[in-house]
Amino acid sequence: MHEKLLKAFIYITAFICLIMFLSVRIVPEISMNMLLQVKTYEEYEDSTRYGELFYMTLIRDFKEDLPHAIRKYRFSDKHPRLEQADIIIYGDSHFDHSRHVSFPEQLAGLTGKKVYYYRINKPFWGNAPAFLETMGYQPSNGKLFVYGSTERYVPERFWASYQPEVMRTNIRPHQYLLRNVLFLENTDLLYTTILKRGYITHSLYTTLSTLRFRLFKYINSFTPEYHIDPGNGSWLFTIESINHFNQKFSDEDIQTIASNIGHMARLIEERYGLDFVFLPIPERYTLYHSLTGNNGPYNNFLPRLYAELDKLGVNYVNLYDDFIESKSILFHMTDTHWNENGVVIGLENTLEKINGMFFADWSQTGESSP
């Protein structure tokens, strides 16, 4: 009898492992979703209820109800082709967040212009000229290129200058099989997702994580600092933003970063005929670090960078001053992205810049914001 039970257990375990193996390798966004209680949708957002940092920790103290996810602008019929665009936004996930009408879509509505958005990702990461060159973009005057970046990624993206190289690779059939089936990138992350969000394990994992935190203050090393406030909402902060806040940048470091941004601006303007605007978005931790009990001084990365960009004549949007003075909460508490209040200030400052510097005929009297 024991042998039969053991044999049945082995067969069932093997079957579950096979299903998991196939699910993360054969169209994961479809097949893997069958195993998940909290689904993953590329056109919307990883989850449809709580902030992304909750799903990293699964601690109930950090459940923050977010607005229901809507379809992302870049997947909609409103999104133009690159060659059709009056404005090209090359930016990270702040411009792609699906909890509200996104920055690019609202900018299109406010200006009445065609706005193309590319989410910074592999293989380009930060190399905007390579993106334009690879896409075969033809020079076109009177159009605008907005480079948007989260504050903490600016140093990483601009330690060196970029070249407009074509970034295409020819992958042979056996290489495709190895990379996309047998040794799929991010496989460990996908298996962890099944563990954290699976129908069978999600509740158990959440209970254990919450218990560990409440008894021993144990929390994921990716989100080491937090602020608990049951009445007004609790905050989580990522190690990346904390490290950026504490990092010491020399004057030479700031000059190098600014110089490389300036090099990109000139390259995009001269090679592709596009007016360049740099749009760095302040970090949540930069604004709200005192909530965690950290009253240490900010390294003034953005103000120092602004000063160097002024010297080089690089056009940029200053969000830091208005963000730091705002009485409103500008970011989600358990999600790294800005909320609608932050987007409003971002749009106002961007419109002021492009109206005043480039297009006198552009105004906020275009189509109403969707």
Image: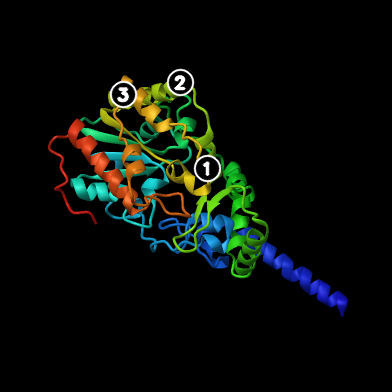
Disc 2 designates what residue?
251
Q: Residue at x 33, y 43 (%)?
A: 325
Residue 276 location, quadrant:
top left
Q: Residue at x 52, y 52 (%)?
A: 236
Inspect the image, locate mark 1, and give the three-letter code of the amino acid beneath it: Asn
Q: Which quadrant of the rendered structure holds the C terminus?
A: bottom left
- Between marks 3 and 1 in the image, the one whose residue lies nearer the viewer: 1
In the rendered view, would you say 182 is above or below 135? below
Answer whether residue 71 is visible to the viewer in this image: yes
Answer whether residue 27 is visible to the viewer in this image: no
The reply to whether callout 3 and callout 1 are in contact (CB within 8 Å) is no
Inspect the image, locate mark 3, and give the three-letter code of the amino acid beneath it: Asp
Disc 3 designates what residue?
310
Can you give x and y, in whole percent of width and height, for residue 147 in the image?
A: 35, 35
Disc 1 designates what residue?
294
Q: Residue at x 56, y 55 (%)?
A: 56
Give the distance between the C-alpha atoms of the residues marked 3 and 1, in whole angstroms: 31 Å
Can you give x and y, in whole percent of width and height, for residue 99 in the image?
A: 38, 57
Disc 2 residue crowd, few under 14, some 14–19, many 20+, Cα 10 Å: few
Residue 307 location, quadrant:
top left
In the rendered view, would you say 85 is above or below 314? below
